[in-house]
Image (cartoon, grey):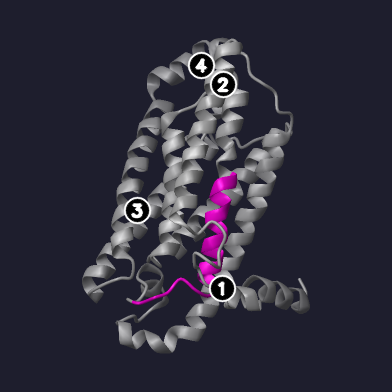
Amino acid sequence: MSTALISSLTYYLSEHPYIVGFRWGHSQSWGSTWSFLITSIFLYIAVSSSLHIILSAFLPRNRSVSLGHIPDIHSLLMSILSATIFAGILLSTAAEIRDTRWFWRRSKTATPLQWLLCFPLGTRASGRVFFWSYVFYLTRFLHMLRTIFAVFCRRRLAVSQLFCNSAMAFTSFLWLEFSQSYQVLAILSTTLVYSVVYGYRFWTGFGLPGSTFPSFVVNCQLVLVVCNLVSHAGVLAMHLIKGGCNGIGAWGLNSVLNGASLLLFLNFYMRMHSPMRRHFINTSPELEPSNAKELTFED
């Protein structure tokens, strides 16, 4: 890759004036109000539930509605967006560390990792990092389309799916509204995993060979859960050591939502790997619902 191309990508991902000058605000950023967030989540739940009820009323439960390759194109789009956000926030984080490191002494911050875990008190939601956090927040609404695909193609709607997707949109909003610590690591880990998971879904959606590793997508999600747990523990430790991290109140609410999502995921993971289910699939694969082996926590 040429130096000119690298410089161009760096400029458009972290040094563009709009990215550097970004500021989160109700009058400056689309979708930045509490009313928009609450209305969007309500509509997501209402549309998904209504669609599921209507299909259940008019179609047999085991009959799916084909959407062609629309879910696969969506997976490709989400994979590209996730990879772009990952690269953008990684470059933006490096630039922010370079430009603000001189100021860290006043907030007892000694290393980049400490800054990533614990923003100094008084941090405002502006600049490069928060621009990519805003883009990530907007992609949560695109991610919700997975629920619609599940209702059509798999004829299923799980309460855990509605809760987790709604919680993720709500959490992403809190990151920006309260300049919450820890969000950079959360976005880096989430977009890295999502770029792989959605890329894998796009690959297998067109009939190409999948991974020989069992439950590939679910195990990727497990890695993400572990990373989030470690990061949350790091934020709490830094908050106690440094005497305060920005947005710690929002972090507490975030932790409650993540804890509920973790319990739902562990319940799903245990059911996926239960001896009874494996025995059922191995002895009677023809009775397994269509694509059930590929079901994931988010589907």
Q: Are marks 4 and 2 in contact (CB under 8 Å)?
A: no
Residue at the spot 54% in from the left edge and 49% down from the top edge: 140
Q: Residue 282 carries which label?
A: 4
Q: Nearer the viewer, residue 151 or 81?
A: 151
Residue 10 visible (yes or no): yes
Mark 3 / mark 4, whichever is N-terminal? 3
Density class for disc 3 (Cα within 10 Å; few <14, some 14-19, many ≥20) is: many
Instruction: Name the front one of labels 4 and 2.
Output: 2
Amino acid type, residue under disc 1 in the picture = Phe
Mark 3 / mark 2, whichever is N-terminal? 2
Q: Name the residue under label 3.
A: 254
Amino acid type, residue under disc 4 in the picture = Asn
Instruction: Name the front one of labels 3 and 4.
Output: 3
Indicate the secondary structure of the residue bearing disc 2: loop
Q: Mark 1 points at which residue?
A: 22
Mark 4 / mark 2, whichever is N-terminal? 2
Q: Magenta stretch: residue 76 in it?
A: no
Q: What stretch is highlighted in magenta?
A: 122-142
68 relative to 148 in the view: left or right: right
Instruction: Name the front one of labels 3 and 1.
Output: 1
Where is residue 196 drawn, in percent x and y? 60, 48
Instruction: Tell me where residue 150 sits by quadrant.
Output: top right
Instruction: Tell me where residue 121 sits by quadrant.
Output: bottom left
